[in-house]
Image (tube, helix red, strand yellow):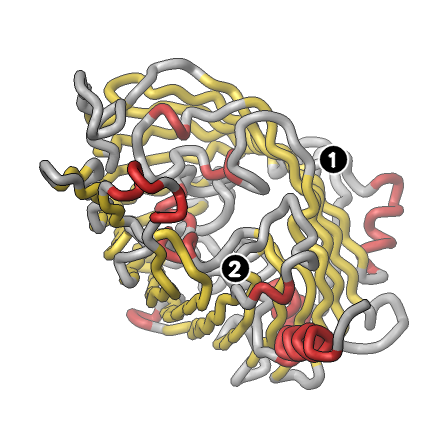
Amino acid sequence: MINGSAMNKHSTIIAVILTSLGMSLISARAVADDTSPTYSGDLLNRSTLTGDWGGARNDLAAKGVTIDLGLTQIEQSVVGGGKSSTWEYGGRGDLTLNADTQKLGWWPGGFANLEVESNFSRSVNRNTGALMAVDSSQIYPVTNDGNNVNVSALNFAQFLSHNFGLIVGKLATVTTTSGDMNEFAHGKGEYQFMNLAFNFNPLLAVTVPYSTLGAGAIILPTADPKQAIVTLSVLQTNGSAETSGFNDLDANKLTFAGEGRVRTDFFGHTGHQLAGATYSNKTFTSIDQSFRVFIEGPTAIQQKDRSWNIYYNFDQYLYEPNKGSGQGVGIFGRLGMSDGNPNPMHYFYSLGFGGKGIIPGRPIDRFGLGYYYITVRQPSFTSPLATVSFLRNEYGFEAFYDVALTPWMQLTPDIQVIRPAQRDTVTPISPGRQGVNTASVFGVRLQMQF
């Protein structure tokens, strides 16, 4: 039997989740876009390999139901430096279903979202010695090498007016929510950059799980999310794509997040400015541990309460032949700062430029070049003899060119050069340490939409 205090505790947590303000870019986009996608056309020109399914897919879309299937495959190797030079093949499959209650003839302003993901085989992420994954697609929905299938998102959003909506459920924070959106550098590594450092601000990874229970609301100051959007949310800090999240709702391990993005018109071209912050009340393991951990055991591990970070990003077109078309060339940048403990990544920035459709006859080809730098708060182990640090600051470059073989199939050669955070191939207190040198990584990505 559940006692009264436990019942009140559960009720309070559920009430907080249901009434807290949060974020949903998918819902916001749907409000602003009254058109339905079309999947028709010949094999070389339609948007998906399988087309319109004899018209059924277009009919479903007209009624507010869209079903999208994607497959990302990557062959990649550390061709110099790092920890290992083995070639690895891996990938990720993704099924996304969205439903619009108004188009279904039910009620206005309601949007449901389901996402099922699977990553398979292996990546070279562990071969570089870097904090940042060189193959982002292989860390979603979980980071383990091998085959798995998980439900990353299952949520419902309801707009109460043109300017305000609520969302509750399991959220895939990179896609369901606005998630540090950027025109030239964002996503799960299936398009644009492959390195995690260019797809979102990595400082967020400590406080914001990729897949987690949460709730929130969307505020649209102009009723158009393309102009401005403000999101505030409460998330379960322990969330995972492998669990439902309901088992430890009463654990009081919550992340509170806020973010705002506004469209700009500098130089007469499209741009965006974004700023946000997160705070978690979870108790983490401190990155600094004294020698007594090894003598007294796990009970002596030092803890660190709470973690926070603030972040900013921008994107700005410098050349935009048709404003709002998504084609042209521009620059982007990100900045971030965390507490430095328990988050070992203290400061972060990235800069670069990217573009789409700048070569005549190649309207959907993409390209990008970027650089990132992470200031690492050195985790250390203190013994009676010395204090040993085993990480260093990390930086890296990436360049890619995305060749659109058809609208539904893109082939992308990619090269990365990274000075990894890991200094040595063995623990710092062991003899015979061997340094981890700058890693050169080459890969090819094939992305398909079915």
State the residue at coordinates (34%, 71%): 268
**Residue 306 at x, y = what percent?**
39, 65
Question: Which of disc 2 and disc 1 is earlier in sequence?
Answer: 1
Question: Is 120 left, or right, of 182 in this rendering?
Answer: right
Q: Which residue is mark 1?
A: 42
Q: Residues within 10 Å of mark 2 (few under 14, many from 20)?
A: many
Badge number at residue 204:
none
State the residue at coordinates (75%, 74%): 3
Q: Nearer the viewer, residue 87 or 365?
A: 87
Quadrant (top left, top right, bottom left, bottom right) of the C terminus: top right
- Quadrant assignment, res 73: top right
In the displayed image of the protein, which residue is found farthest to the top?
A: 86
Badge number at residue 237:
2
Q: CA distance from mark 1 to mark 2?
A: 46 Å
Number of the front mark, 1 or 2: 2
Quadrant (top left, top right, bottom left, bottom right) of the N terminus: bottom right
State the residue at coordinates (44%, 74%): 260
**Residue 97 at x, y = what percent?**
75, 52
**Residue 223 appears in the figure:** yes
Q: Height in image: 100 above or below 73?
A: below
Tell me the SS state at disc 1: loop
Q: Height in image: 260 above or below 432?
A: below
**Residue 16 at x, y = what percent?**
62, 78
Question: Is 439 left, or right, of 329 in this rendering?
Answer: left
Amino acid type, mark 1 = Asp
In the displayed image of the protein, which residue is found farthest to the front?
A: 296
State the residue at coordinates (33%, 39%): 131
Amino acid type, mark 2 = Thr
Tell me the SS state at disc 2: loop
Question: Is 66 left, or right, of 285 in this rendering?
Answer: right
